Image (tube, coloured by chain):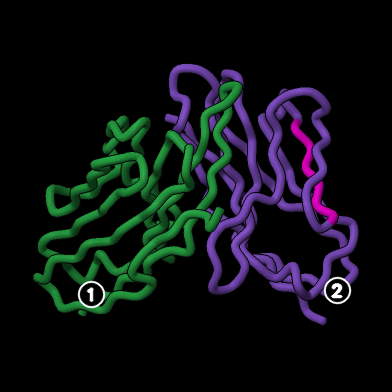
């Protein structure tokens, strides 16, 4: 069965520290990849997405993610975090083709940034 | 566009009562999803529709849960009878299929508490 693994359950950083959140998926076919962010008390919002082309994708608020097909990974990065980045981050995968419409989410990583 | 609209935002009810959650997707979107979020299980897909037709309801916990989409602009998720373990935030999301990818837009969620 398809699974999405986010290895870090809770990450605590100081402002200006660099961030990398891991995401691995198990599906061997062609995928679309997403990172969503959920700020405290709010709904999920799209942070960035990868469909095809350049495996390094840039999203909003200085976030980027790199798709490494050989490692089935789509890690999220930011060189310098801010207090306002405190939120929960979800990696998600969608299979292209017959299972269009089904988005598989990881369990989420809670990021806490101390000022 | 006002985005995905969910109601009610908060619902507190007693065990055994019927609960109906409502969702209005973004106009023109052809997919609609119902997710449930809890601390224990994270984000779970309950059911999704394509062009008002249920495609995958394998995530619906049990017969107490039912979902309908009578038209392209409205969906309901009903729990009857409700139980305390149904307490969660229920998110509705919609998307427009294009080029084999789905980018979900989430509603603000309905926080359900069953006493």
Q: Is residue A102 left or right of residue B86?
A: right
Chain B, colour shown: green
Q: Are marks 1 and 2 on the same chain?
A: no
Q: Residues within 10 Å of mark 1 (few under 14, many from 20)?
A: some
Chain A, colour shown: purple
Question: Is residue B85 placed above or below A34 in the rendered structure?
Answer: below
Residue with the mark numbered 2: A15
Q: Position of residue B46 (x, y in %)?
A: 32, 46
Question: Is residue A96 placed above or below A50 in the rendered structure?
Answer: above
At a point 82% along the width and 82% down the height, the residue shown is: A115
Residue A63 visible: yes
At a point 13% along the width and 66% down the height, the residue shown is: B18
Q: Tell me the element at label 2.
A: loop
Q: Position of residue B7 (x, y in %)?
A: 35, 66
Chain letter of disc 1? B
| Magenta stretch prevailing secondary structure | strand
Nearest to viewer (mark 1 / mark 2):
1
Residue with the mark numbered 1: B114
Q: Are the two marked residues, 1 and 2, in contact with CB atoms closer than 8 angstroms?
A: no
Q: Which residues are magenta?
A: A62-67
Mark 1 vs mark 2, CA separation in Å? 39 Å
At a point 41% along the width and 57% down the height, the residue shown is: B91
């Amino acid at each position: 069965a398809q699974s999405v693994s986010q290895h870090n359950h809770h990450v605590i950083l100081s402002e200006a520290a660099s961030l990398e959140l891991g995401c691995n998926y198990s599906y061997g076919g062609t995928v679309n990849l997403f990172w969503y962010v959920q700020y405290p008390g709010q709904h999920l919002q799209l942070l960035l997405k990868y469909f095809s082309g350049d495996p390094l994708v840039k999203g909003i608020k200085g976030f980027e993610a790199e798709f490494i097909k050989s490692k089935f990974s789509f890690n999220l990065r930011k060189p310098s975090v801010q207090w306002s980045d405190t939120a929960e981050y979800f990696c998600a995968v969608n299979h292209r083709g017959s299972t269009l419409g089904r988005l598989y989410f990881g369990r989420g990583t809670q990021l806490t940034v101390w000022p | 566009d006002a985005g995905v609209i969910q109601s009610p935002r908060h619902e507190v009810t007693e065990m055994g009562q019927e609960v109906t959650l409502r969702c209005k997707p973004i106009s023109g979107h052809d997919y609609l999803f119902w997710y449930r979020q809890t601390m224990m299980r994270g984000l779970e897909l309950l059911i999704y529709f394509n062009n008002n037709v249920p495609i995958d309801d394998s995530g619906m916990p049990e017969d107490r849960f039912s979902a309908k989409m009578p038209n392209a602009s409205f969906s309901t998720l009903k729990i009857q009878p409700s139980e305390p373990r149904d307490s969660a935030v229920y998110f509705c999301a919609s998307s427009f299929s294009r080029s084999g990818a789905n980018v979900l837009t989430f509603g603000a969620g309905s926080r359900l508490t069953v006493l």
